[in-house]
Amino acid sequence: MDCFVALLLAMTMETGSGMAKAAKAVGIAAGQCLCGKVCFEIDTPARWAWHDHSAASRRAHGAAYATYVGSWRKRFRITKGNAGITRFEDKAAKTTRSFCAHCGTPLTCERARSPHMVNIPRALFSGRTGRQPLYHIAIEELQEWAYTGEPLVPLRGFPGVVWQRSRKKKRIDHDGMF
């Protein structure tokens, strides 16, 4: 089963309804690209939020994973810079990704099988979206180099930098040799 279909099924079971419906809008969440030439907004609460560990999202974002907010298309609006958006269509995956043509920021990911939805990177929003990312998609593609919550300590001499200490090897006591 496709991981996004599984996510939708899980959310449908979670809400107890047979069909996903938009919650009543209670606010607006605004976002923008890095350079600020493209701005957008969604009505909140968003439909869902999740972490996507798939290779496609990893490559599109240049990161270990991407965190998305899903919104109904009718609740998503470009408020500035519509002409400055470029699109990449992946015919094999049946997805279309939008980017700011000036700074390259990933803006949306749309799927042909869900034409009524638009997925936006969570980091582009300046405030709350009404949903926390509770789901993980393609977790089996999690990279071994991705941070998974290990304890971090300050790096001496470099303010604001933390690091993960490597595990100390246990010394083997060979019957009192040492």
Image (tube, rainbow, N blue to C red):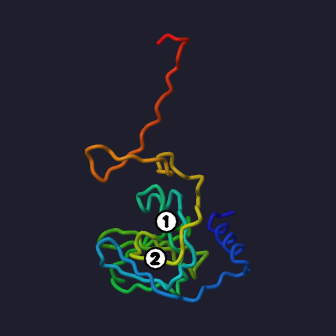
Return the residue at label 2: 128
The residue positioned 72% from the left and 73% from the top of the image is 13
The secondary structure type at the circle numbered 1 is: strand
Q: Position of residue 83 (x, y in %)?
A: 34, 83
Q: How crowded is mark 2: few (under 14 residues within 10 Å), some or many (20 or more)?
A: some
Q: Which of the two residues, 58 or 42, is positioned nearer the viewer here?
A: 42
Q: How far apart are marks 2 and 1 (CA)?
A: 14 Å
Whether residue 62 sits left or right of residue 22 in the image: it is left
Q: Residues within 10 Å of mark 1 (few under 14, many from 20)?
A: many
Q: Which of the two residues, 60 or 17, is positioned nearer the viewer here?
A: 17
Q: Position of residue 150 (x, y in %)?
A: 49, 47
Q: Where is residue 45 in the image (x, y as percent from the top left)?
A: 53, 81
- Tell me, yes or no, whether the two marked residues, 2 and 1, touch with CB atoms within 8 Å: no
Whether residue 125 sits left or right of residue 9 in the image: it is left
Q: In which quarter of the image is residue 133?
A: bottom right
Q: Position of residue 156 (x, y in %)?
A: 29, 43
| Residue type at the position of mark 1 | Thr
Mark 2 or 1: the one toward you: 2
| Residue type at the position of mark 2 | Arg
Position of residue 102 relative to residue 137, above or below, is: below
Whether residue 99 sits left or right of residue 21 in the image: it is left
Which label number is shown at residue 67?
1
The quadrant in which the N terminus is found is: bottom right
The residue positioned 51% from the left and 86% from the top of the image is 75
Position of residue 167 relative to residue 18, above or below, is: above
- Please report whichever mark, 2 or 1, sits nearer to the chain's N-terminal start: 1
> What is the number of callouts on the image?
2
The residue positioned 52% from the left and 20% from the top of the image is 172
Position of residue 94 relative to residue 146, above or below, is: below
Whether residue 136 sits left or right of residue 88 in the image: it is right
